[in-house]
Amino acid sequence: MTKYIKTNTSGSLIILLLMIMVSYSSFSQKSIEDQDSLFRLKESQLKGYTNINILVAEQGYKNRYMDVPDDKLAVFPGLEGPMKPTILPAKSVTSWKKYSAGTSSRLAIFLTDTASNWLGIVSGLKAQGVPFRVTTSIDDALTHTVVLIYPAIDSKNMDIETFVKLREHPKNGGVLIGFNVIAPSMQSVFGFGKARYSNQRDNIIIRNFSIPETSFIEDINEAKLRIGNLNITKENTTTFGYEETAYQPIGVFEDGSAAIIRNLYNDGACYAFGFDLGFLTIFAHANLDPQIQRTYVNDFEPTLDVLYRMIKSIYIEYSDFPILPGMVPENKKVAILISHDIDYTKSIDSMLLYAEMERSKNVKATYFVQTRYIKDGLDQAYLKDKYIPYFIALKNMGMEIASHSVSHTPFLSHIPLGTGLEKYPDYRPYYFTFTSTFNETILGELRVSHFLIKELFGVNATSFRSGYLRYPEKLHVSMQEVGFKYGSSITANEVLTHMPFNPMYDYMFDEELDVFEIPVTIEDELPPKMDKRVDDAIILTEKISRYGGVVNILIHTNILGHKYRFQEQYTDHYKDEAWFGTISQYGDWWQARTAIQIDIQKYKKLIKVNIEAPLEINHFPIIVPKNLKLITTIPLNNNIERTEEGYLFSKLNGRIQLIFEDQSALLSR
């Protein structure tokens, strides 16, 4: 806590609110909305005319410098920093051994190429809560019932002995899941006659809805999946279309060849996917094909969620006792995050009114604050003494204060990384126009905003959102080193998932970071106005809730009007069904959830479930088959209650063993 933090806000909050309401009473809400519409129209025309990526592609990007005089700065005497340099760590390739622990109750990833995109598969399975472990040993893998072979089933990384052992597994009641299955000796095992290569396929159409693997599909966007966009690119990723299949294909490519197939045995099965799901996952997470999605935002784009939900369904279908972590805190229907971008002076004027509404509904929201301390070509410097009490009041209302950068530059994906020495007040990014900016660096935007939020508001910010949702290659590793844990700088549609995920260090895709990206689901700037699309937002939320996903809503607080009405109606609709929290609250919960390990052992009629929670987690549900009855826990834990789908821990940390009795015989009578 420094001398800059204003803590005497107990009596000032009401005064501030009254001042704001008085200022609003001087002109009608309609005039505010009209003014906002004119501002946004002007901005959208400029952005449309100068789409940043097109502009850079046509004209190139040159990092430019200009002297910004002291009289443009909001000065806090004696404040300087951060003084500690930010040095990005050297690359450290994530080893498959990080995920090698566990028992045979889990799904096994049989990794035949450790240099492949296996971290994509890991990311998808973690999101869906499928217990798994990674091994490079075929004998080890085949001790598991469900074995996923990655990256491909061909002769490149497998010998004859491995093929022989794999062929026997489904005959013995096991399950094989393969990608790009092209080895001739495995065609009959997986139930097809030919595999035809093509790089001219970009859609998968689900055809078979009568099986457990696809029974969850209800929406057209679940039945037609995007794996590329040949309208934009001449070639897509490698695919293999299966022909002469033994069973009706689960899904087909647009040319009619099978994209996803199954072959059934007495008790076992084989599943073949004609594409590299690991590559598709990390390619989408990195947004390397920005046109792969059908829509940019405010819509349902569940390609990755559908594919990993299929694998989850396979695991549940063939596992003796599929016990999995729940998807939403408190076992609620869906997780909803309300977030606000404070990147305009008028946003400060009304943000406390949003916060007061949220507090009245027992909702905590995240406020991404642009630490603009320079008067530039776009706006005044609003990080100054006049407005700091507003942000302190926001914090005291229980809201999360997060970083929205310093300059809100539209060129974040193109500016230099920086030196790691950037500090206030020497770092002086200048936003001249929508197409002309100066002095910015990625590390400067992160370091200085993090420092100022801590020094001026007394908050150690853990969440970051970039201006214009820009998403450079080194964003997340830079965030991690500065001290941020959670990002929200891309839309769910762009990354083909409504789940959080761990980004990679860079585009080599071989080092998984600790930070999480929590993508944006709904935003406030595209037409129609927000209060005209409450029903659409509810329909979208219902679709995401079937996956246990997260709905992350972005609302600028520059006006009340239609945005305020939307938020009020939407939160009222879900007040009893949804879990509401901040970006960091949900991020902490999700991080702890994905770290949980579940292993199962059977001893006569008893089922022993070992759960290890390395990080403390509250309101954590587990999904348990209905034929299992909880007998006791070791050590005794009274923080557990029965739910319709399993059990709910009010608090969990460390190791616990749950002892269940298998009542299958009793239930079958």
Image (cartoon, rainbow, N blue to C red):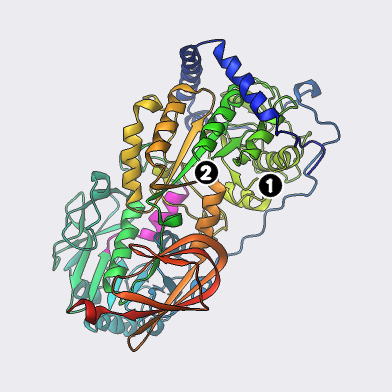
The picture places residue 443, in percent across and down from the top left corner, at 67, 43
* Horizontal side of residue 290 vs 542, given as left or right: right
Q: How crowded is mark 2: few (under 14 residues within 10 Å), some or many (20 or more)?
A: many
Spatial CA span between label 1 and label 2: 17 Å
Q: Can residue 526 be seen in this view?
A: yes
* 490 w.r.t. 55: above or below: below
Q: Give the amino acid at mark 1.
A: Asn
The picture places residue 511, in percent across and down from the top left corner, at 55, 61
Q: Residue at x 46, y 67 (%)?
A: 640
The picture places residue 91, in percent across and down from the top left corner, at 62, 60
* Quarter of the view holding residue 88: bottom right
Q: In which quarter of the image is the N terminus?
A: top right
The picture places residue 458, in percent across and down from the top left corner, at 72, 42
* 394 w.r.t. 95: above or below: above
- Which residue lies under the disc numbered 1? 460
Q: Which residue is drawn at 79% across and 23% down?
A: 69
Return the mark for residue 488: 2
Q: Nearer the viewer, residue 346 or 632?
A: 632
* 162 w.r.t. 497: above or below: below
* Horizontal side of residue 610 vs 453, given as left or right: left
Q: Give the amino acid at mark 2.
A: Ser
Return the mark for residue 431: none
Write down the region rendered in magenta: 273-286
Q: How crowded is mark 1: few (under 14 residues within 10 Å), some or many (20 or more)?
A: some
Q: Can residue 236 be seen in this view?
A: no
Element at label 1:
loop
> Does residue 285 belong to the magenta stretch?
yes
Q: Which residue lies furthest to the right in this view?
A: 78
* Horizontal side of residue 251 vs 413, given as left or right: left
